[in-house]
Amino acid sequence: MVQKLSNFSVVIRSKNEERWIGYAIQSVLDNLNKPEVVVVDNNSSDRTIEIVKFFSENPNLNNQTNNYSKIKILNINNYSPGRALNLGVKNASKKYILILSAHCI
């Protein structure tokens, strides 16, 4: 069994990524141990944020699986790639930070 890496915050920029965002987050959960996911969204008008919330850990449940994670959703109005990444990194709390595009698997 391969040991998953720990202590990661994953920053994902998004805008209308409903087609891919679930695959990206699932890939993160499959490869990292209890990561923090920080999604910086540029006012998506599709179901992107709804899909992201499916992966959010519920603290009221005693979930022993790695199918859910602590997720922070940040909205950014004055979007630029650098500004979005800086906001995500600023709000990350883990030791290591991984930057991932919303359409990456």
Image (spheres, rainbow, N blue to C red):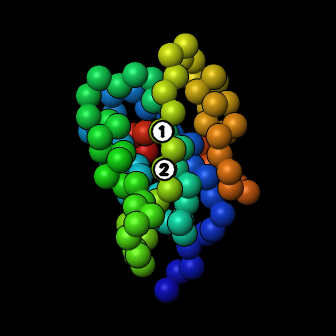
| Residue 92 location (% of width, % of height) | 65, 46
Q: Is residue 100 visible?
A: no
The kind of secondary structure element at disc 1 is strand
Residue 49 shows in this picture: yes
In the image, taking residue 93 as reference, residue 100 lies left or right, namely left
Q: Secondary structure at mark 2?
A: strand
- Tell me the residue at 43%/45% (across/down): 104
Mark drawn on residue 97: none
- Residue drawn at (58%, 27%) of the image: 84
Q: Say which amino acid is labelled 2.
A: Ile
* Rendered location of residue 13, percent (x, y): 50, 33
Residue farthest to the bottom? Answer: 1
Above or below for 69 versus 74: below
Q: Mark 1 near mark 2, Cβ–Cβ under 8 Å?
A: yes
> Within 10 Å of the Cα at label 2, are there few (<14), some (14-19), or many (20+) other Cα atoms?
some
Q: Which mark is residue 71?
A: 2
Please tell me which residue is depicted at 53% across the width and 66% down the height of the picture: 34
> Does 73 sit above or below residue 4?
above
The type of residue carrying mark 1 is Ile
Q: Is residue 51 above or below residue 96?
A: above
Picture coordinates of residue 59, whole percent (x, y)? 45, 64
Task: Determine the residue located farthest toward the right in the rendered image.
Answer: 95
**Label 1 packing within 10 angstroms: few (<14), some (14-19), many (20+):** some
Q: CA separation, marks 1 and 2? A: 6 Å
Q: For residue 48, what is the image quadrant?
A: top left
Res 6 quadrant in image: bottom right
The residue that disc 1 covers is 73
| Residue, far front | 60
